[in-house]
Image (cartoon, rainbow, N blue to C red):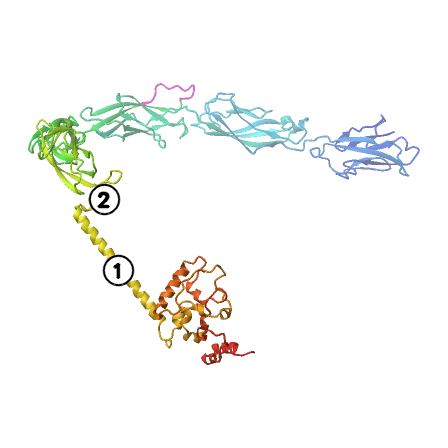
């Protein structure tokens, strides 16, 4: 059996052994070493595995040694295996497990989790109120005294009102209040030095460390606002609103700009009608006494207000005051010049229209509200759209300067409004008043025919139109109306019927005088001229050509004369056009009959023709006049052009006699042009090219063969060499003979 007993420099280490033997110090032995020479070895972490080399064994004696200091905070135990072999390396014993536990020593100081701890507690807190917790840790074994910590407060700053305002739980690190008297207005924060010691706080063997704790005293509303003086005063002009009369100042020891510091002002007496308000300035905490309703000096000259100030939140529990802080505010009202006031305003009167100028209507006066001032009131007109009235500047009497007319466009719903102004004092104060005049209607307007223009169509049978009348007066002074044609009796009705009795009346515009009388108490009559437009009828029975009649306003004779003049002008224009066409036709004929000695190449080239050069100067006109005389063989001579007409059914072009007059050639060409324009198979180029087509289906040869009569003999082209280098090549090409 193999067993071992170990001890280290840090203390005796328990060793696991398979059997119980007498312990040997630092020695591993086998009971077989008496018979054989054995060799001992250990394996595992700390021996032959990382961290290697911490434990070594003497292979002969079996003594186990430690080569390096052991750190429990790094590795708290090692698990090794011991082996015993003979000199040949054969295992003679089963390996045994060796567990080496490193016994802790107090080699680590406590460490606080923070260098500075921050906490807070409300002022006025009772003893035993929790404040905060401080925490420290120790790397040593917490199951031994080496890792058991104890806390204590070393110092307190400031030491007011007591040097022991706080205490700490020595095991948990909880800091609590131990004395009363925390007052933020006196001490805003405390600084504590806290110590943590291991070895259960043993000052001799334990290791210690310290940290700083800052405890902030939070504010509560334990101080009411206090006015800086017992009375305040201010002045304000009468009738002024939204102006500050006085600034009410207070002091509050609580933390600024908190609800415990902000003041709320309230008027508790002296303002039963609510003419004042006291908002708070959020920056200065002042109360701004403000006028919110106008105050009349003649009614009240001064106010004595009682004002109370409180915080936004109530006072803390346990704070009792003998009385709520109040202050007296005296306000004096200053007299100013007020505007005169019309009474009543607006003022309404009822009058008949048609009053003459200079008529007195009413008196419209204003009163000065300043009873304690001696001032004169003056009147003036401010707004009179029709300029009908005037006002006496001293007594306010209103009279007319023009006739009042209910039908005026300035009268709305029978009512006419005029604005007057009253002025007093220095500086002047102005007041305005409105006079409303209700105008009653009188029969002062004669009726007029309506519509003023009508049109009638000439047609057999009954032919009539309805007309009525318009009257600006009201209904009682307007219809029903009486209509009268000259020489006819009156016909009383809302409308009349106008008939056309002469069916043959010529078209035109006629003015028919009609006398109309209204139904007023004193009737008024008027002769109106009705414009009647008589016109011819279309098949629908409606007027025709009415626009021309309306625009001109002329009779039938004048219209006929204008039409004849227009026809004559059109005939002259037509004759001039025909004369111009005939002149162009003669000029074209003359151009075709010019002397052969003249240069006619330009005239031929303008039709886009291509010929045989100078040979085209001398051509036979009979070929154009009678192309049917050419032989068929000659028609087949030549090269087909790229723009030649495609092979279609031949269009029928005009045929002429065998010997036409030379002067008809131009006419013949025009007839050919007309036929080509009507040809649906014609190409989209100049139709005169039809006289240049060659080959079968054409009765005419090339223009270059006109001078060769009707023979198909060879031409002589040697003379082309005399025309220049360009024509010399043509001469070589066509005059070279058989070559």
> Where, by quadrant of the figure, is residue 196 drawn?
top right
Which residue is located at x 59 percent, y 25 percent?
172
Quick check: 135 left or right of 102?
left
Residue 320 falls inside the magenta stretch: yes
- The image quadrant where one finds the N terminus is top right
Q: Residue beneath label 1, please?
A: 575
Quick check: 703 left or right of 132?
left
What is the chief secondary structure element of the magenta stretch?
A: loop
- The image quadrant where one finds the C terminus is bottom right
Which residue is located at x 92 percent, y 35 percent?
36
Q: Residue beneath label 2, please?
A: 547
Q: Is residue 349 above or below residue 501?
A: above
Q: Is residue 566 above or below residue 714?
A: above
Residue 557 falls inside the magenta stretch: no
Q: Is residue 477 above or below residue 733?
A: above
> What label does residue 282 carry, if any?
none
> Where, by quadrant of the figure, is residue 2 drawn?
top right
Task: State the extent of the magenta-drawn residues as a range.
Answer: 314-326
Residue 493, position as x, y percentages in the image: 15, 28
Task: Determine whether the residue tagged by mark 2 lies in a helix, strand or loop.
Answer: helix
Which residue is located at x 25 percent, y 23 percent?
304
> Where, by quadrant of the figure, is residue 102 drawn?
top right
> CA gap, disc 1 to disc 2?
32 Å
Q: Single out the residue that lies furthest toward the front.
A: 658
């Amino acid at each position: 059996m193999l067993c071992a007993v170990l001890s280290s420099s840090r203390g005796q280490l328990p060793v696991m052994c398979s059997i119980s033997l007498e312990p040997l110090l630092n020695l591993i032995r086998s009971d077989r070493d008496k018979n054989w020479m054995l060799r001992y070895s250990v394996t595992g972490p700390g021996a032959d595995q990382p961290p290697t080399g911490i434990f070594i064994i003497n292979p002969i004696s079996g003594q186990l040694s430690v080569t390096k200091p052991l750190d429990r905070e790094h590795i708290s135990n090692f698990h090794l295996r011991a082996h015993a072999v003979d000199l040949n390396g054969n295992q003679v014993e089963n390996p045994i497990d060796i567990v080496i536990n490193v016994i802790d020593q107090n080699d680590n100081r406590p460490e606080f989790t923070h260098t500075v701890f921050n906490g807070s507690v409300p002022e006025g807190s009772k003893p035993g109120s929790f404040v905060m917790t401080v925490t420290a840790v120790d790397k040593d074994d917490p199951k031994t005294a080496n890792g058991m910590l104890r806390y204590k407060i070393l110092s307190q700053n400031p030491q007011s009102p007591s040097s022991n305002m706080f205490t700490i739980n020595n095991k948990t690190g909880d800091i609590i209040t131990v004395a009363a008297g925390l007052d933020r207005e006196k001490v805003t924060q405390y600084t504590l030095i806290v110590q943590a010691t291991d070895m259960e706080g043993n000052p001799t063997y334990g290791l210690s460390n310290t940290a700083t704790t800052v405890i902030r005293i939070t504010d509560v509303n334990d101080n009411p606002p206090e006015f800086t003086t017992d009375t305040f005063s201010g002045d304000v002009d009468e009738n002024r609103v939204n102006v500050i009369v006085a600034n009410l100042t207070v002091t509050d020891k609580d933390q600024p700009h908190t609800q415990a510091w902000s003041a709320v002002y309230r008027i508790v007496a002296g303002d039963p009608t609510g003419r004042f308000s006291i908002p708070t300035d959020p920056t200065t905490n002042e109360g701004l006494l403000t006028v919110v309703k106008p105050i009349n000096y003649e009614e009240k000259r001064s106010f004595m207000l009682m004002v109370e100030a409180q915080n936004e939140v109530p006072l803390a529990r346990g704070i009792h005051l003998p009385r709520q802080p109040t202050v007296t505010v005296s306000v004096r009202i200053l007299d100013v010049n007020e505007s005169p006031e019309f009474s009543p305003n607006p003022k309404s009167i009822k009058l008949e229209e048609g009053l003459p100028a200079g008529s007195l209507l009413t008196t419209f006066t204003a009163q000065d509200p300043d009873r304690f001032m001696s001032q004169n009131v003056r009147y003036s007109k401010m707004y009179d759209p029709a300029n009908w009235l005037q006002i006496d500047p001293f007594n306010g009497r209103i009279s007319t300067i023009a006739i009042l007319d209910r039908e005026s466009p300035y009268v709305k719903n029978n009512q006419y409004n005029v604005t007057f102004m009253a002025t007093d004092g220095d500086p002047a104060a102005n007041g305005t008043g409105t006079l409303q005049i209700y105008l009653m209607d009188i029969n002062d307007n004669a009726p007029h025919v309506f519509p003023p223009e009508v049109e009638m169509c000439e047609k057999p049978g009954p032919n009539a139109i309805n007309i009525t009348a318009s009257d600006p007066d009201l209904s009682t002074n307007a219809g029903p109306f009486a209509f009268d044609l000259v020489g006819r009796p009156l016909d009383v009705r809302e409308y009349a019927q106008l008939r056309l009795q002469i069916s043959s009346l010529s078209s035109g515009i006629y003015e028919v005088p009609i006398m109309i009388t209204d139904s007023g108490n004193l009737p008024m009559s008027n002769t109106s001229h009705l414009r009647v437009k008589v016109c011819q009828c279309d098949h629908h029975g409606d007027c025709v050509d009415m626009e021309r009649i309306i625009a001109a306003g002329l009779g039938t004779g004048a219209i006929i004369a204008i039409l004849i003049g227009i026809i004559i002008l059109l005939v002259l224009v037509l004759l001039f056009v025909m004369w111009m066409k005939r002149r162009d036709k003669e000029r074209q004929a003359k151009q075709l009959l010019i002397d052969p000695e003249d240069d006619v190449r330009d005239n031929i080239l303008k039709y886009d023709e291509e010929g045989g050069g100078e040979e085209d100067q001398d051509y036979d006109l009979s070929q154009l006049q009678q192309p049917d005389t050419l032989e068929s063989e000659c028609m087949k001579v030549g090269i087909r052009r790229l723009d030649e007409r495609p092979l279609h059914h031949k269009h029928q072009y005009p045929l002429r006699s065998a010997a036409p007059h030379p002067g008809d050639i131009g006419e013949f060409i025009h007839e050919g042009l007309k036929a080509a324009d009507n040809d649906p198979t014609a190409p989209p180029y100049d139709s005169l090219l039809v006289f240049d087509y060659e080959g079968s289906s054409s009765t005419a040869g090339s223009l270059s063969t006109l001078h060769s009569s009707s023979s198909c003999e060879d031409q002589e082209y040697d003379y082309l060499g005399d025309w220049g280098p360009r024509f010399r090549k043509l001469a070589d090409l066509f005059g070279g003979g058989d070559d």
